[in-house]
Image: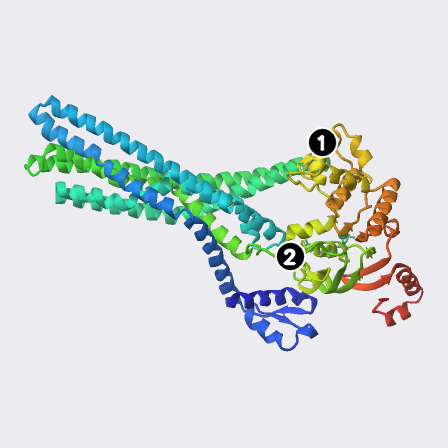
Amino acid sequence: MAQGGNRSARKLVMSAPFGKSTRTEAGAMRITHPSYRNGVLSEVQTATKKEDRLQNSNELTSRGRAELVETRNKSRGLYWVVAVFSFFVNLLMLTGPLYMLNIYDRVLSSRSFETLLALSVLVAFLYAMMGILDFVRGRIMGRVGARFQSDMDRRVFGAVLKATTNSRAPREAATGLRDLEAIQRLITSPALMALFDLPWVPLFFLGIFIFHPLMGILAVVGAIILLVVALLNQFTTRKLLEAANAAGFASEQLGTHIRAESEMVHSLGMREAAFDRWQLARGRSLDSAIGAADVAARFTAMTRSFRLFLQSAMLGLGAYLVLINQLTPGAMIAGSILLGRALAPIEMLVGQWAVFQRGREGWRNLSVLLGHVPADEPRTQLPTPKASLVAEQVTVVPPGEQQAALRLISFAVSPGQAVGVIGASGSGKSTLARVLTGVWKPAGGKIRLDGAALDQFDPDVLGRHIGYLPQRMQLFDGTIKENIARMSMAPDDAKVIAAAKTADAHEMILKLPDGYDTPVSAASGRLSGGQIQRIGLARALYGDPVIVVLDEPNSNLDNDGSVALNSAIKGLKAEGKAVLIMAHRPSAIQECDLLLVLENGARRAFGPKDEVLAEMVRNHGDIKRSAGKSGGVS
Ligand SMILES: Nc1ncnc2c1ncn2[C@@H]1O[C@H](COP(=O)(O)OP(=O)(O)OP(=O)(O)O)[C@@H](O)[C@H]1O
Ligand SMILES: [Mg+2]
C-alpha cells in the first residue's frame, strides 16, 4: 500500500502552500495551516523526507519500467523465433570457412573438378538459405519494433500531455515521443541483431580451438581486448552522447518556437536576437555532436583496424603452424575467416553504440515518465449529468508551483443558472476555469458535477459534458468545421452548424472563402481575434455540454458579438444548462444570476448578482463595515 501512502503524502504537500510552509534542512515540508496542525501533520513530515521522496521516485520509475517490459514481452514469442533463426544463420556462417577448408585441403590437392562443383552448388544453396533466414529475422525485428511503438504510442502521448499540463517529469515529457522512437530504432537496428549473434560467438571460437589451441588462444585474447575497447567506448561516450542528444533537442525546440512565433519575432524586431540565440543553441548542439562523433569514430576505427590486424595475425600464426606441419593450409585460411565472423558482432556493437545508447536513454526516460503518469483507469460510465455543479472548499495549486492560486472556494450552480466570476487580474478566475474543466486537479476540496466528483468521469467524457472557452484561444491546423467539432474524426455537420449558430458565428463563417471548410492554421491563422473567439464559443457549445465555462468570452468581441453572446447564454439557461463566465467587463455578466467575486485567490463574495453588487458598492462606501463582513454575502 506504499503507493497509496505516497499519493496522499503528495497531495498534502501540494496543499501545503495555502497555509504557511517552510522548508527544513531535511527537505521536509512543515505545514502550519491550522487544519493540518494535528494528526496528519506528523505523517506528512515523515513521508516527505528526502530519502522517502527518492525512494518514491525510484518506485515510480520501476513501475514505469514494468509497463515497458510488459509491452516488450508481448513480442516474446517473436524474439524466440529470431533467436532460433539467429542460431541457424550463425551455423550457416560456417559455410565460408568450411568451403575454404575443403577447397584447400581436398579440391586443390586432389585436383577434382567434380568435388569443386558439388561443393560450390552446396555452398550456393547454403548461402541462399542464410540470406533468406537473415532477411526474415530482420523483417521480424522490424515488425517487433513497429509493434512496440504502436502499442506504446497512445500511452506515451497521453502521458506526455498529462505530464505537460501537470508539470510532472517535465524533462522526460519533453522528449517522450522521441524516446519511444529511439527504442523502436534500437529494436530494428543491426545493433540488437548483433546481440542475438553474440551467444554464438563461442561456437566460432570453439571451431578455431579445434583447428589449433594456439589459434584459439589468440582469438580469445583478441576478443577480450575488443570487448574492453567496447566497454571503454561505452564509458567515455555515454555522457557525450547524452549531452549531444540533449543539445540537439534544445536547439530544435528553440527553432520550432521561433517559427511558431514568427509574427512576433518580425514585428518586435527580434530577428537578430532570435537568430543569435538559435545559432548559439545550434552551435552548441553541433559541437557536442562532433565531440561525441569524434570519440565514437576513434573507437570504431580502433576496433576495425584491430580486428583486421587480428585476422592477419591469425593468418600469420596459421602459416607458422603450417610451416612446422601442425596445420593444413585450409585450416589456416578458415581460422582467419572464422575469427572475422566471431568478432563481427562485437565490432557491430561498438559501431552502433550511439543507437544503443540513445535507445537505453529512451528506455530510462520513458520509465520515469510512465511511472510518474500512471495510465487512466477505465471508469464506470455515468449517465449524462444534470447541470448542477458544486465546489466544496476547493484549493488549487498550479502545477509546479508552491503557492495556491485558489483557496477554499465554495459555491454551487443549479441548472438554468449563470454565474459571473469577477475579480482583478491574477485573482484566480482562469485558475477556477481550469479546475472546473478538469485540466488541473484541486489540491484540496472537491468539485462535484451532479453529485459525482470530476475525477469520476473519464477526461474525454467530462470534456463533452463541460464546454470550455479558454482565455487564450488557440485553433488547431484543420478546417473550421473540424475545429468546432473538436478535431473529431467524424464531425457531425448538423451539430457543428447548430453550435456555430448559437455562438453567432454561422454568418461570419459562411462569408469565409470556403465557409466551414476553410482551413485555418494554428500558427498564422487568417481569422481576427473576435472571429477566433466566436469559433471558440461554438467549439465550447459543440455536442450539447451541460455546463459551459467561458473564460473572458467577450474580451475580443464587438457590440454585436456581445449581444450574441448574451443571447447564447440566455438560450443555454433556458435549456436547463449552467454557465460560468469569467469576466472583466460588466457587459459579459448581464445574463448572470449569481456572482462570485474572487480576490487574491479567495472568495470575496458569492450570491445573487444584485445583492453582491449592492454589497460591493456599500463596501466601497464604508470600508470599516466591509471589514466586519469579510465573509461576504452568501
Ligand atoms: N500555469 C501556471 N503556473 C503557475 N502559476 C499560475 C499558472 N497560471 C496561473 N498562475 C497563477 O495563478 C494566479 C491566478 O491566475 P489566473 O490566470 O487564474 O488569474 P485571472 O484571474 O484569470 O487573471 P486575468 O484576469 O488576468 O485573466 C496568478 O498569480 C498566476 O500567476
Ligand atoms: Mg484569466
The answer to whether residue 312 is seen in the rendering is no
Q: As shown in the figure, which amino acid type bears the numbered disc 1?
A: Asp
Q: Residue reaching furthest front? A: 383
Task: Left or right? Give the position of 359 relative to 332.
Answer: right
Task: Provide the residue designation for mark 2.
Answer: 399
The answer to whether residue 555 is seen in the rendering is yes
Tags 2 and 1 in contact by the CB under 8 Å rule? no
Element type where label 2 sits in the image:
loop
* Displayed quadrant of residue 343: top left
Residue drawn at (50%, 47%) of the image: 152
Foreground pick, 19 / 514: 514
Residue drawn at (12%, 26%) of the image: 115
Task: Left or right? Give the position of 151 relative to 501.
Answer: left
Q: Which quadrant: the C terminus?
A: bottom right
Q: Is mark 2 within 8 Å of ligand 1?
A: yes
Percent x, y of residue 348 = 33, 39
Of callouts 2 and 1, which one flags the residue occurring earlier in the amino acid sequence? 2
Pointer 2: residues within 10 angstroms few (<14), some, or many (20+)?
some
Which disc, if any, is residue 517?
1
Percent x, y of residue 436 = 72, 56
Element type where label 1 sits in the image:
helix
Task: Left or right? Give the position of 328 relative to 83.
Answer: left
* Displayed quadrant of residue 323: top left
